[in-house]
Amino acid sequence: MKKHKGKSKVTVYPDWCKGCGICVEFCPSKVLDLTDQGKAVVAREEDCIRCGFCELHCPDFAIIVKDKEPVEADNPTKIAAKKNATGKGA
Amino acid sequence: MNEITGNEIIHQYLRHNKKFPHVLCPGCGHGIVLGTLIRSIHSLNIPKDDVVIVAGIGCSGRLAVYVDFNTVHTTHGRALSFATGIKMANPKLNVITIMGDGDALSIGGNHLIHAARRNIGVTALILNNNIYGMTGGQSSPATPMGATTMTNPFGQLDKSFDTVELARGAGANYVARGTTFHVKKLEKVLTDAIERPGFSVVEAITPCHTQYGRKNKYKTPVDMYKWMKKAAIPVDRYNELSEAEKEDRLAIGVFVERDQPGFEERYFDLKAKLQAQEEKGGK
Amino acid sequence: MARRKKRKEIFALGNEAVVEGALLAGCSFYGGYPITPSSEIMEIMASKLPQTDDGVFIQMEDEIASMGAIIGASLAGRKVLTATSGPGFSLKQENLGYAVMAETPLVLVNVMRGGLSTGLPTCPGQGDVQQARWGTHGDHPIIVLSASNVQECLDMTITAFNMAEKYRTPVILLLDEITAHTREKIEIPYEGEFEVFSRTIPSMPPEWYKPYEETVRGVPPMPPIGSGYRFHVTGLTHDRNGFPTQRPEEVVELMDRLHRKIDQFFYDIQLVEEIQTEDADTVVIAYGCVARSAELAVQQARANGIKAGLLKLKTLFPYPRRQQEKIMANAKTIIVPELNMGQMSREVKRVNQGRASVRTINRIDGQIITPSEILKVIMQG
């Protein structure tokens, strides 16, 4: 799981989210928060370990978890560079 | 390469001319079951045109309209009889029924036992939320004894059905149970069920917080998922428990695996035999 | 005549003739549950359908399930039949309404027996006439046909299938125990001698298909499930896509079309047989086995110098109003004999509006109305 950390892009579609709180409650890395408006939001994307729980358990298909950038396994330096760039941005 | 995964797969199977989010309550497990069903069908590479979803009436019955398959929303309890007709009319189709606990076990109980006896090649997906949700929270045949409902305000007096034992006794080829917390396992059994010839029953435990939970000490939808997480236990480990320990637990997994030919197979074999006889007789 | 030679003559029960007619019309699916006095239809189907190329026979667990099975099979493209009698007819009503709403062609034969409830299972009756019209809940159009002899059992079954397919609707064929259990010589028409109508299927790419779209006839094309046209079928009030709706304008559009697709084709649907009605001042209006007694009574009355005639109803609903109005040009007396307390006579009186004198003959003791009973009333004038 650790190798996925920081590599995921988590998207929540607020129009489809009904704010049931399942994703927020059960996310092992506490990536998601529930806003005052009753919608799930991505608060700590870099902590996502890509377990897939939120995506599998969203009753409204409102969460998408994907690779942040296209990963090219044969070019480790490029990946490292991108990782650093992301780290700066956050 | 960013492959299409997870909910993006599901989005491809939803009807784009339907309004989303769907009508079901926040935290309702039915959406999770629908997503699981879509992933199962996707993993089996079955073309959309070959899938028929036959739904009954109730919250579960509302699911069919959202998916881009051939969908039939039938009368209350009768989904399996419609499905039997469709399967016999065109055995090449993958026919999956979506029924609720009231739908499948109460008003449609007779169809369930006879579909199992006949071993018709249909997958029966039973969404058990222990209550009649859409009509406002009345007792269903799956409401646990002692639970509070609109029609049992002083506690449910009668016992609930054990779907697994019922389907086993009636002769289904495949019987399994899963929960909307243990989604991967549910997907596995559902995929097996669709693949297996003959009649398959998958009971999905799916929480109804609105009509059942709130009246029975589950204050939030999340509480219901916590209950499932705690209560569910694989069937082999469940069987090792004492009767007292079993009390609050819920066995999940595969309960029955048989390989009897489905009704449609037996019928069309008979037809072929009769036709061969006729050709012989007619010189 | 050379043409007649090609017809096959058989000695058959009314119920047997129904099966012959159904197979000629292209029926390839039967789902049923046994009940007296309709069971022969099911038994003969059980032996014949498995021996045809694509025929499917299935005995379902109850009357409700047999209705569900044939609706499912019809959606999957089959021409379908089920048969029942009084108590079973009651059980089928909910799914019958579904078939009207979802515009599913099917033929439902009800061999009427005597009495209400379990009643007189082996005796004739005509007590289900208004139930056939209004048995399922909610406003709905329906086509109800009848037959008065074994040949008509065959002919009207073909007609029932054709109307079901043409108008995408369930068609009820009401028989009675006498007609269903009479055995007589009939002629089986040869291929090409009778019309066989099959439902229209869509002729556009699937993405453009709207399952409940308005058409000239009011009947949308209907693809079989699994043919690439994926759509939603529901008993809920739905829009043109088949999706549930509560918008008043969409509700009205659907309900209007469901009625209009039947109403604008009365000329094709309302079938009667006029026997010596041209100059008749006394007309018997009858259907089913009673029409046979009436025909003899009319002949006997004519022999006695009375200008009597018979309007035999082959379509009961939509009620053949215009045909009755036609005979009322001369008729001073209308006699309605039937095996109930007066169900079709209500329709007759509604059209009559007090113009002619309407007399009813009602028997509910499980016995047939004899020609002499009818003759007696004709002679009274």
Image (tube, coloured by chain):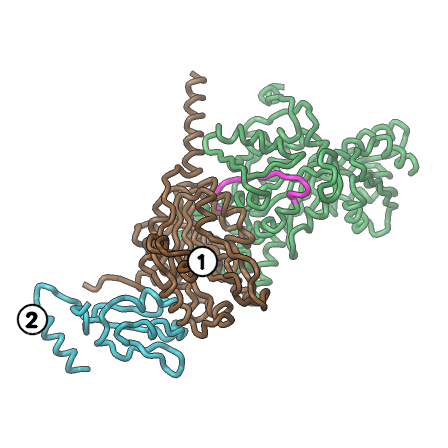
- Residue at (78% x, 44% y) in the render: C326
Label 2 Cα crowd, 10 Å radius (few <14 / some 14-19 / many 20+): few
Q: Which chain is cyan?
A: A
Decide if residue C40 is on the left or right side of residue C56. Answer: right
- Residue at (62% x, 44% y) in the render: C171
Residue A74 numbered tag: none
Is B129 included in the stretch rendered in magenta? no
Residue A77 numbered tag: 2
As helix, strand or loop, the secondary structure at mark 2 comes to helix
Quadrant in the picture for residue B274:
top left
Q: Which residue is mark 1?
A: B127
Tags 1 and 2 touching, CB below 8 Å: no
Residue C2 location (% of width, % of height): 60, 19
Quadrant in the picture for residue A10:
bottom left
Range of residues picked out in magenta: C75-89
Q: Amino acid at mark 1?
A: Leu
Decide if residue C153 is on the left or right side of residue B249. Answer: right
Residue C349 location (% of width, % of height): 81, 49
Q: What shade has chain B been given?
A: brown
Above or below, comparing residue B223 to residue C380 in the picture: below
| Along the line of sight, the residue nearer the viewer: B14 or C286 | B14
Residue C179 location (% of width, % of height): 71, 32
Please state, as top left, top right, bottom left or bottom right, where the N terminus of chain C lies in the image. Answer: top right
Q: Amino acid at mark 2?
A: Thr
Is C77 included in the stretch rendered in magenta? yes
Q: What shade has chain C been given?
A: green
Which is in the foreground here, disc 1 or disc 2? 1
Q: Chain of mark 2?
A: A
